[in-house]
Amino acid sequence: MRGRRDDGVVDLLVIGGGTAGMVGARTAASLGARVLLAERDRTGGDCLWTGCVPSKALLAAADAAAGARTAGRFGVDAGEVTVDFGRVRAHVRAAIEHIRPVDSREALEAAGVQVEAAEAVLTGPGTATVGGRGVRFGRALLATGAAPALPPVDGLAEARPLTSETVWDDLTELPARLAVLGGGPIGCELGQAFARLGSAVTVVDGADRLLTEEPAEASAVVTAALRRDGVTVCTGSGVTAVRDGALRLADGSAVPFDRLLVAVGRRPRTADLGCAAAGVELRGDGTVVVDGALRTTNPRIWAAGDLTGHPQFTHTAGVHGSLAATNALLGLSRQVDPVVPRVTYTSPEVASVGLPPERGVTVRRVGHGHVDRAVTDGATDGFTTLVLDRRRRVVGATAVGPRAGEVLGELTLAVRERLTTTDLAGTTHAYPTYSGAAWDAAVDDVRARLAGPVLGRVLRAAVRLRAQRSAR
């Protein structure tokens, strides 16, 4: 399509230069479309600048510190461990800078995308302003993402709280006491990291446990790990106010802090997007209403990523961006894949996909005390579970342990392709690996079926018959 239009109308206007917007724009340009991407801040989005990349770089530094402190259990004495927070921050910045060129404006332009560093606002069903200039579009893709939310707690704003967005620039020194409000993935990851680096950390959540989206057993393993790293975990009592440098809890207790990090969720960036003018309907929480193909209530506009109400993960945003762009430009109606893996990068990691254990007909669990690689690594407190339906297909899975996110790839494929435990058990797995736990769970299920009252009798009879024939 590139080069065919001379009417000033762009084939695809992309608003937002994060993962969803960049992938959508590149996909559209590869199809020959004339693409204009508007990003008011910097391309790369939350993942590069304030999310996945800096947080995992921080976790790597924290893991190194924890490993050095506990090396004595392997007969390796590292001596006293000291942390230079300035050098830790330099490592985080170096990781961002290494990846930044891939997500840069120059890289997008080299792929055929026109990029404008400006705010875009929808003004009608097929019009927008980009940096104050009027633009007409054939199709549009909304990909403005989400931002950290601050709960309406008395005195919270005055406490100058950090968020997952501001902690990377605003926190220049390691705080002696860090309070983390929120016991979800971000709160647990960053809370554990700062504790390992040397802060006295308290994680506070009004729910009765951490990681409420994960199975209770997984939550218990992570909670125990955080406590071993020195984190104080306060659950079951919400925050009523922030006063005098402390969180005031509903049970009357107080959590003093030097710095406060809030990690209680994210809200979509749609308030200033002009959705009403374009006929794009929003839900009460600000997310964009989309159908299964990511089309909004305006048939010329699609949305992708965090602002859609779908799981807020970078991998979801990337898949959304490609799907929405091809649907918009080729007139397709490909549907969003409902199988979405998720990983919490604590130590140990928690990786899940599909249905939780309580929704399965059968659950096969292997504790990592029976996984040889976990034994050699001294990391036996994790486990792997397979959730099965009546036909022994894998419909869900959870892995808790080192590199559980890497193990989840095979299990996500199993859920998506409706593989059975026979399929997994019949596949040779490398030994010794953590993925062997999933194989062990599948083998356990196959063996249990073979030993069942009906099939077991049939098989035993067949063995006896064959033995009798061989003896003749």
Image (cartoon, helix red, strand yellow):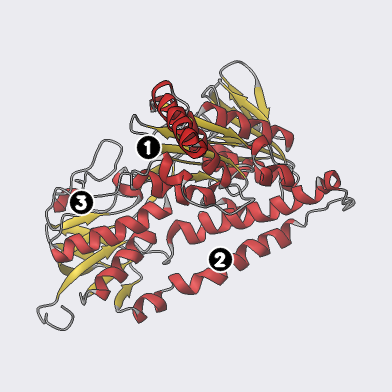
Of the residues shown, which amino acid type is indicated by label 1? Val
- Res 10 quadrant in image: bottom left
Q: Earlier in the sequence, mark 3 or mark 2?
A: 2
- Res 84 quadrant in image: bottom right
Q: Is residue 53 left or right of residue 340?
A: right
Rendered position, 345 above or below 103: above
Of the residues shown, which amino acid type is indicated by label 3? Ala
Residue 169 image position (x, y, % from top left):
59, 57
Q: CA distance from mark 2 to mark 1?
A: 36 Å
What residue would you read off at disc 2?
Answer: 96
What residue lies at 30% left-to-right and 59% top-to-bottom?
321
Q: CA distance from mark 1 to mark 3?
A: 23 Å
Task: State which mark lies toward you, 3 or 2.
Answer: 3
Residue 48 image position (x, y, % from top left):
49, 61
Q: Earlier in the sequence, mark 1 or mark 3?
A: 3
Residue 293: give its label: 3
Disc 3, disc 2: CB below 8 Å?
A: no
Residue closest to the eye, 152 or 294: 294
Residue 171 makes an appearance in the image: no
Residue 265 image position (x, y, % from top left):
45, 39
Task: State which mark lies toward you, 1 or 3.
Answer: 1
Rendered position, 443 above or below 373: above
Q: Secondary structure at mark 3?
A: loop
Q: Earlier in the sequence, mark 2 or mark 1?
A: 2
Of the residues shown, which amino acid type is indicated by label 2? Ile
Q: CA distance from mark 3 to mark 2?
A: 32 Å
| Mark 2 Cα shell of 10 Å, populated few (<14), some (14-19), many (≥20) | many
Disc 1, disc 3: CB below 8 Å?
A: no
